[in-house]
């Protein structure tokens, strides 16, 4: 009796697993690399492919900039930082940064049409605000220039936005005074 029950349950489990395997999404990952803060996604098929936002992002150390501030042209970029990685690996005047600090990251990406997209925010240490095309679409905690001004919150999330045909802009403010590594550790 027990053996029949075990065999029936095992066969049912195998049938469920096999049927679920046939229901998987047919998504693939599109690999394009950002260079000097720009990523061309004009060949990307948004309905069939996920894309990683890896590569060189514009990096503004010790600056918490909002998208509108980039229009005045007086902002001095610190350099380009490779995402994903901690800003601890970045050097300024031959001195590596520590995990403590704050910065703004910026990326432009080009698409060939309007579409509703999403960005996955996995591991950003420890607080952030994210804009796409000047619209605040995600945040975690309260960004600040020191430990007393900020409120820590570790919050991975997925945020949806409307991409426009042509050039789109992603701006992320990050501050960290709680974790040994700071910045954008995993790409989306």
Image: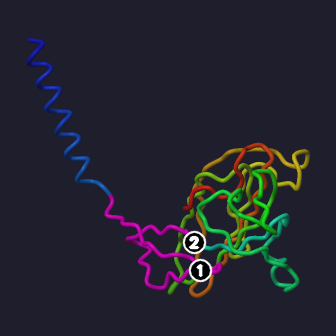
Q: Quadrant of the N terminus?
A: top left
In x, y percent, where is residue 34?
57, 77
Q: Sequence order check: which comes first, mark 2 or mark 1?
A: 1
At horizontal 57% and vertical 57% (from top left) the residue drawn is: 186
Label 2 sits on a secondary structure element that is: strand
Membership of 122 in magenta stretch: no
At horizontal 16% and vertical 28% (from top left) the residue drawn is 10
In the picture, measured across the screen, residue 69 lies left or right of residue 47, that is: right
Q: Is residue 49 left or right of residue 154?
A: left
Rendered view: 167 above or below 115: below
| Highlighted range, magenta | 25-54
Left or right, 141 with respect to 7, comes to right
Residue 102, numbered label: none
Disc tally is 2
Task: Please identify the quarter of the rendering in which residue 128 is found.
Answer: bottom right
Residue wearing tag 1: 35
| Residue 182 x %, y % | 72, 53
Q: Are marks 2 and 1 in contact (CB under 8 Å)?
A: yes
Q: Tag 1's secondary structure?
A: loop
Residue 82 percent location from the top left of the image? 62, 68
Q: How is the image coloured?
A: rainbow
Location of mark 2 (residue): 55
| Residue 32 magenta | yes
| Mark 1 crowdedness (10 Å alpha carbons): few <14, some 14-19, many ≥20 | some
The part of the image, by quadrant, that contains residue 139 is bottom right
Image: 44 above or below 8: below
Q: Residue at x 87, y 46 (%)?
A: 147
Q: Dot 2: within a 10 Å radius of its alpha carbon, few (fewer than 14), some, or many (20 or more) residues? A: many
In terms of secondary structure, what is the magenta stretch mainly?
A: loop
Q: Position of residue 127 (x, y in %)?
A: 74, 51
Vertically, is 66 above or below 139? below
For the view shown, which residue lies furthest in the top direction?
Answer: 1
């Amino acid at each position: 009796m027990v053996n029949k029950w075990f065999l029936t349950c095992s066969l049912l489990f195998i049938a469920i697993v096999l049927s679920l395997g046939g229901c998987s999404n047919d998504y693939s990952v599109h690999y394009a690399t950002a260079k000097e803060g720009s990523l061309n996604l004009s060949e990307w098929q948004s309905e069939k492919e996920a894309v990683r936002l890896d590569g060189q992002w514009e990096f503004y150390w010790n600056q918490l900039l909002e998208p509108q501030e980039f229009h005045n042209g007086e902002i001095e970029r610190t350099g380009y930082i490779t995402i994903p990685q901690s800003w601890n690996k970045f050097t300024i005047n031959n001195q590596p940064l520590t995990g403590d600090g704050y910065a703004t990251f910026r990326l432009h990406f080009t698409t060939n049409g309007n579409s509703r997209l999403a960005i996955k925010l996995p591991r950003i240490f420890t607080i952030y605000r994210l804009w796409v095309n000047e619209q605040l679409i995600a945040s975690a905690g309260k960004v600040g220039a020191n430990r007393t001004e900020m409120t820590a919150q570790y919050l991975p999330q997925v945020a949806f936005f409307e991409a426009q045909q042509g050039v789109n802009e992603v701006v992320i403010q990050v501050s960290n005074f709680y974790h040994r590594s700071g910045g954008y550790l995993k790409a989306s």
